[in-house]
Image (cartoon, grey):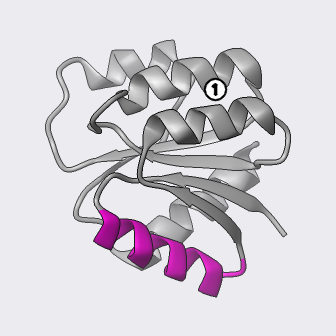
Amino acid sequence: MKHVLLIEDDVDLLQLFAAALKEAGFLVTKFNDPIKACLDFEANPYSYDLVLSDIRMPGMSGLDLVRRIKNINNRVNVILMSAYEIDNLDSKLRQLGLDTFLQKPIHIEKLISAIKRSFEQH
């Protein structure tokens, strides 16, 4: 069973995404605080197969979170998502070695499909 670290500051979306991922057969650990999520990842860097994170969050951006995570374990799959336009997003994603970004609102089927595709590619 693949283990997903889910980070989303919107509690309603966090619950919705977590329930959908569990229903799709993933083990999910969820956080609405990116700093706590980062600390958990640092303590357990190889227990996660994928990190699914919002980009705009209070306390730490998703881009900063990914930089820290990738410095610890650069093999973990990462998918970022946002409801906002991000300047130079493509170049920022390439710098981080990411190719998957999801624009909110996200249909659950598209989310699950993107996660499965990420596992197939890596």
Residue segment shown in magenta: 11-25
In the picture, the quarter occupied by the N terminus is bottom right
Position of 109 relative to 99 (above/below): below
Residue 107 is one of the magenta-drawn residues: no
Look at 75% across and 60% down and name the residue there. Answer: 3
Position of 2 relative to 103 (above/below): below
Q: Percent position (x, y) of residue 101?
A: 40, 43
- Give the amino acid type for the residue marked by disc 1 in the picture: Ile
Q: Percent position (x, y) of residue 59?
A: 33, 29
Magenta span dominant secondary structure: helix
Q: Between 79 and 40, which is closer to the camera in this rendering? A: 40
Q: Residue furthest bottom?
A: 23
Look at 43% across and 45% down and name the residue there. Answer: 33
Q: Between 30 and 101, which is closer to the camera in this rendering? A: 30
**In which image quadrant can residue 116 be found?**
bottom right
Q: Between 119 and 44, which is closer to the camera in this rendering? A: 44
Image check: 105 left or right of 99?
left
Position of 46 relative to 87 (above/below): below
In the picture, the quarter occupied by the C terminus is top right
Look at 58% across and 33% down and name the residue there. Answer: 38
Image check: 22 left or right of 88?
right
What residue would you read off at disc 1?
Answer: 69
Q: How many marks?
A: 1
Q: Percent position (x, y) of residue 26?
A: 71, 72
Image check: 105 left or right of 35?
left
Looking at the rendered structure, the secondary structure element under dot 1 is helix
Residue 17 is one of the magenta-drawn residues: yes
